Image (cartoon, rainbow, N blue to C red):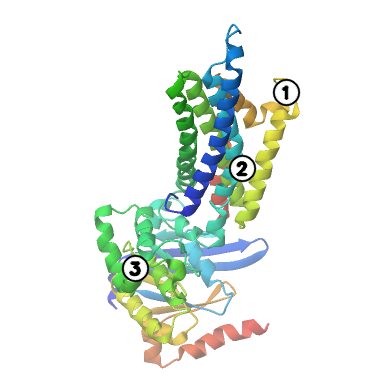
Amino acid sequence: MSAKTEQKTVSAHGLSRYFGARTAVDQVSLELRQGEVLGLLGPNGAGKTTIMRLLTGNLAPSTGKVEICGMDLQKQTLGAKACIGYLPEVPPLYRELTIDEYLRLAMRLRRLARSKTDDAIRRAVERCGLDNVRRRLIGSLSKGYQQRAGIAQAIIHDPAVIILDEPTSGLDPNQMRDVRSLIRELGAVRSVIFSTHVLSEVESVCDRVQIINHGRQVFEGSVDMMKLEGTRLEEIFTQSTLEKIET
Amino acid sequence: MFGSPLAWVILALAQLVFAWFYLANLEGFLQVQPQLIRIAHPPGATEAIAAPLFSIGAVVLLMITPLLTSRLIAEERRNHTLPFLISAPVSMTEIVLGKFLGLMIFLSAIIALIVALAVSLLAGGTLDFGLLLSNVAGLWLLSACFVALGLYISCLSTQPAIAGAAALCILFALWIMDNAESGENGIIRSLSPFAHFENFNRGMIDTFDLAYFALFIFFFLALSVRWLKLYR
């Protein structure tokens, strides 16, 4: 695959995070190259969200190290964060702003030139299908639009690494399809990590998949390889997560 | 902030209170003025009208500021918008300073309203601009203390209402501390920012008071930055 020659954008080693005595994430490592889409799978409460918070600097790891585009997230924090676009589980929206104002704020917060703002907003709005609600207050929009506004703020500064926590939750089937094709489009030139519960989504969008259970990585594989070998993701998912739920 | 009705409502109500006291002071001053002439060093209009106005300003700000600071971090946490700030390439110090300065700009507008009232006295007399400046500086520093304290309290809670009430109670306690001791230099009294404001109010700018305000503001801003760092 050509991905091998591409530049490494995300590299995390031995990530753990403890909340008191509870271990939320245990020695998880992951790597991503430019032009790759990685799907994070796992049952509810497996630690997917925590992993994404660790990768974006929203949570400090108890052990381990994250490098984004060659920059250490702990030491060269600002440089590393500038390369990330992040959609948290709950989209971080200011309800009293319009979509336009909100995206303008996102641009300013990331210190991007004002001359580029209009173009960047137009592109993000177009990509996320927000054209006809640009001047409406975010609080008055439906959940689907709000979710897409969250995606728009994550991609507006054209980051090298895009991390999306359940980007398709709360969307109707048509919108899901649009977001999936958007992820594929972004994944062709950028690196995308996203979490989901929908297995078919992983099969149709991702290059690689990692399954997390109880904070530990229980499976990693290439989607193409799985298709070649004829293994079904659903079986792997059930096998790797089921027994541990029962115990 | 100036795009929201909240800002304008607060500005209007604050101005109403200031105008009320301004007129009351003015009337009182005019009544006693004939007798004042007989005293050797009679208080001027600045001392008799403007300075008390700034004291009232301090009390009004004591009540308004917690209302505004309560939202600063608490609401970001409640609405899950804090990751939006934390994931951006800005440092925690910048986030805290941004919040602090943003609110200070608004409070400066309230202080400007008081200054405008005081300056309007020029229409019928002269002003002691030194005393006026010292009052402006004092009130500005005092409100900066309120904001720094309120900002930190706002970090501690996800409920803006709790953060607001707690900040109000603490500020109120500090205010009472100012009146707790009758002596000039009691320890309890010197811990209260209001006691340090009083010197400014009298037109006395003391480096001790300046140092106190600087330390107070720095202490709570630093605590807020620390809290944000540990929050991760």
Q: Is residue B80 above or below residue B112?
A: below
Of the 4 image quadrants, the one containing the N terminus of chain A is bottom left
Find the distance from the CA under tag 2 to the CA under tag 3. 38 Å
| Mark 3, secondary structure of its residue | loop
User: Of B94 and A238, which appears nearest the observer?
Assistant: B94
Query: Which residue is tagged 2?
Result: B63
Q: Nearer the viewer, mark 2 or mark 1?
A: 2
The amino acid type of the residue labelled 2 equals Met
Quarter of the figure that contains the C terminus of chain A? bottom right
Q: Is residue A209 above or below residue B207?
A: below
Residue B138: x %, y % from top left: 54, 28
User: Which image quadrant is residue A34 in?
Assistant: bottom left
Query: Pointer 2 indicates a residue of which chain?
Result: B
**Amino acid type for the residue under numbered disc 1:** Gly
In which chain is the residue bearing label 1?
Answer: B
Secondary element at tag 2: helix
Which residue is depicted at the point 58% across and 14% down?
A: B34
For numbered disc 1, what is the local secondary structure? loop
Residue B217 visible from this viewpoint: no
The disc label shown at residue A134, or none:
3
Q: Amino acid at mark 3?
A: Arg
Figure quadrant of residue B196: top right
Mark 2 vs mark 3: in front: 2
Mark number displayed over residue B186: 1
